[in-house]
Image (spheres, rainbow, N blue to C red):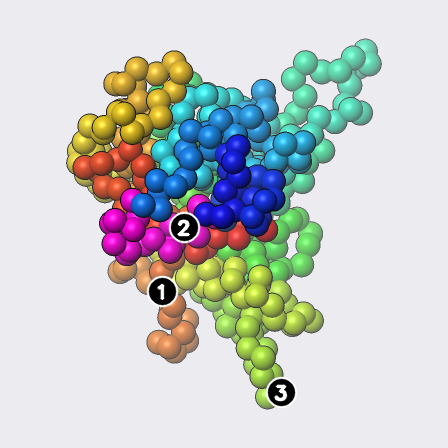
Amino acid sequence: MSCQHPEGGFGGGPGQMAHLASTYACIAALSILLDGADQNVVDETLAKIDRNKMLQWMLSLKMPDGSFTMHHGGEIDVRSCFGALTVATILNLLTPELVQNIPEYLVSCQTYEGGLCASSLPNKFSHEPDGTQPEMPSAAPVGEAHGGYNSCALACDFLVQGLPSLSGSPRLDYDACLRWAAQMQGLPIEGGGFRGRTNKLVDGCYSWWCAGAFPVLRALMTSDFPDQQESFDLFDRQALQEYILLVSQDLTSKAKQGGLRDKPSAKADMYHTHYILAGLSLAQHSQKHSRQRLEELKASFKTPDYSKCIIGNSESQDEAFERMKEIYSRALAWEVEEDKDLVVGLVSNKVVSSSSWWLTLACHSSAQDPFLFLFGAGHSYLYILS
């Protein structure tokens, strides 16, 4: 809490400027630390977060096209958008003003390959035959689809789905995105790992960055077809586990340091160990966004104490209630399909299931008091903005 900035948000340390990356990390870390804590401790800690200033600070970072800067005067890309939306979801600050134009921004980041890039970058060399700039240039004409940015963008898209204020907004081409994402998995001769970009080498960290997008993508693609909820794999789970167990580990007799690595030519490090383990969990445990669970959560959602809620400038209490119910229910409707577990090799290779992308199924403020949803943040996205 000493990292909280007096004007809102959190810095990387006491006295440092507020930054969306460090704000995300602090809120995610608090979620993990408070998971299972006594409710009095939870309430006392949350009361120290200035949510009004947090929202005003995030709004000050918002750009007209729907994107966010990382900090005042900072860079813009989909990571900052993900950081803002995640924090706003956890703290129940996802107001209509904050999400305005986000779907349009995300659509502008989808490349000709189908995957999403860091940000929309108009191509100044793209002109009509008469030499004029086209009124509607192609999406992200000079952007490059990337596994990490693609994962962040899809998570953003999922977070704003179903919000009443965004009905009728443009949508991503999920089929094109799936086609690109599936092509990022390497061939058997490459070990079955994932690459982050077209024509690049496979890299252990993309075990999470690429594979982690598939459960979210599946949820987005099936949202229009509620009757088609059967489970199906969008990537080769066995091949990814084989890459992790046989390639990302140094299995030579001289290996003593442990940890996991990018590829055989690299040394193990904490960054890759973190993401590779998250990818291993995803490959072993199939996860889905459950329609049944979603409806159960909506039915259990009760009227909050509006004096503790932050309501959008243009919202009525009824509209705010529907918004909060949708956010709460969608965020917690993820389920692990235990009958679909797939573990390559020995039983001892099995790791615990992580959340599909950033949430566990724990919630400190339940439907009885949903003014602040402090979800237990899954480890998989703890360092997403690093």
Tell me if residue 109 can be seen. yes
Q: For the residue labelled by badge 1, is the local secondary structure a helix, a strand or a loop?
A: loop
Check disc 3: other Cα within 10 Å, few if <14, some if 14-19, many if 20+.
few
Q: Which x, y percent locates residue 299? A: 17, 33
Magenta residues (range): 26-43
Counting residues from the start of the chain, the first of labels 3 and 2 encountered is: 2
Q: Distance between the residues labelled 3 and 2?
A: 39 Å
* In front of the other: 314 or 179: 314
Q: Which x, y percent locates residue 100? A: 48, 21
* Main SS of residues in magenta: helix
Quarter-of-image position of residue 191: bottom right
| Vertical position of residue 254 compared to residue 329: above or below | below
On whether residue 27 falls in the magenta region, the answer is: yes
Q: Name the residue under label 2.
A: 30
Q: How far apart are marks 2 and 1 (CA)?
A: 21 Å
Counting residues from the start of the chain, the first of labels 2 and 1 encountered is: 2
